[in-house]
Image (cartoon, rainbow, N blue to C red):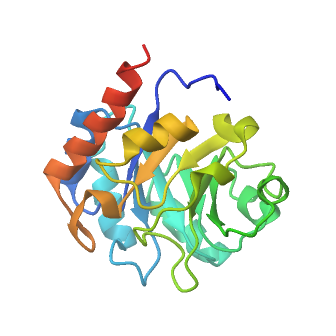
Amino acid sequence: MSRERISRTRIKLCGLTAPEQVMLAAELGADAIGLVFYGPSPRYIETEAASRLAASCPPFLSLTGLFVNPAVAEVEAVLDKVPLDCLQFHGDESDDFCRQFRRPWIKAVRMRPEMNVEQVLTQWPGARGLLLDAWHPEHPGGTGLTFDWRLIPDAWRHRIILAGGLTPDNVGNAIQQVSPWGVDVSGGIEAGKGKKDSALMAAFVAAVREEDNRHD
């Protein structure tokens, strides 16, 4: 079945922790970066450090903050110090919970093979987008695992940010199959857990743009 392609796939590079990574993301032409406010993650960044990193962001680079089942006060404390453009929720947060912060937000959905995808995706009508990630029983994201992209309904692609095990080697194929609005990567641009690699960052962005250009 043919599908209308998105003209330009948006790119989010997630789990950045240093100003030089932010500047590289901007220079490469990424649309957004992600800061992880989840303590157990190897990409966790403290609020004060995130505030300094946000100050280094050039114009038009969207800043997203990632949370996992946070307390309301936890999100508000970050927002008091970090000028986030978008919130990203990776836990069991409800639509009502996510809406209350009066910021655009994204809901991550971990794709179980047996789930009714259409039914699940309708649970967050207030979300600006839905980030589809691989299921893991112990980790809410950043596992490096992929899922069956055929589970994604065609009608949802304009709201979908594809994540889960993407790398410079497979992201072109992922865009071919899914034609998502955007792609999100963290582990696939790392030399080790939480250690971003500039060459992999550049290769990932180049692979996305190469696939986009094939259909211009």
Q: Nearer the viewer, residue 47 or 170?
A: 170
**Residue drawn at (33%, 53%) of the image:** 167
Q: Is residue 128 left or right of residue 123?
A: left
Seen from this angle, which residue lies furthest front?
A: 1
Please tell me whether residue 156 is drawn above or below residue 3 in the rendered image: below
| Position of the N terminus by quadrant | top right
Seen from this angle, which residue lies furthest top?
A: 216
Determine if residue 180 is in view. Answer: no
**Residue drawn at (33%, 78%) of the image:** 42
| Position of the C terminus by quadrant | top left
Residue 61: % across, % down: 38, 37
Residue 141: % across, % down: 49, 70
Residue 132: % across, % down: 60, 56
Please tell me whether residue 176 is drawn above or below residue 200 in the rendered image: above
Q: Is residue 25 left or right of residue 115?
A: left
Please tell me whether residue 212 is drawn above or below residue 28 in the rendered image: above
Q: Is residue 115 left or right of residue 24?
A: right
**Residue drawn at (22%, 60%) of the image:** 18
Determine if residue 170 is in view. Answer: yes
**Residue drawn at (50%, 20%) of the image:** 7
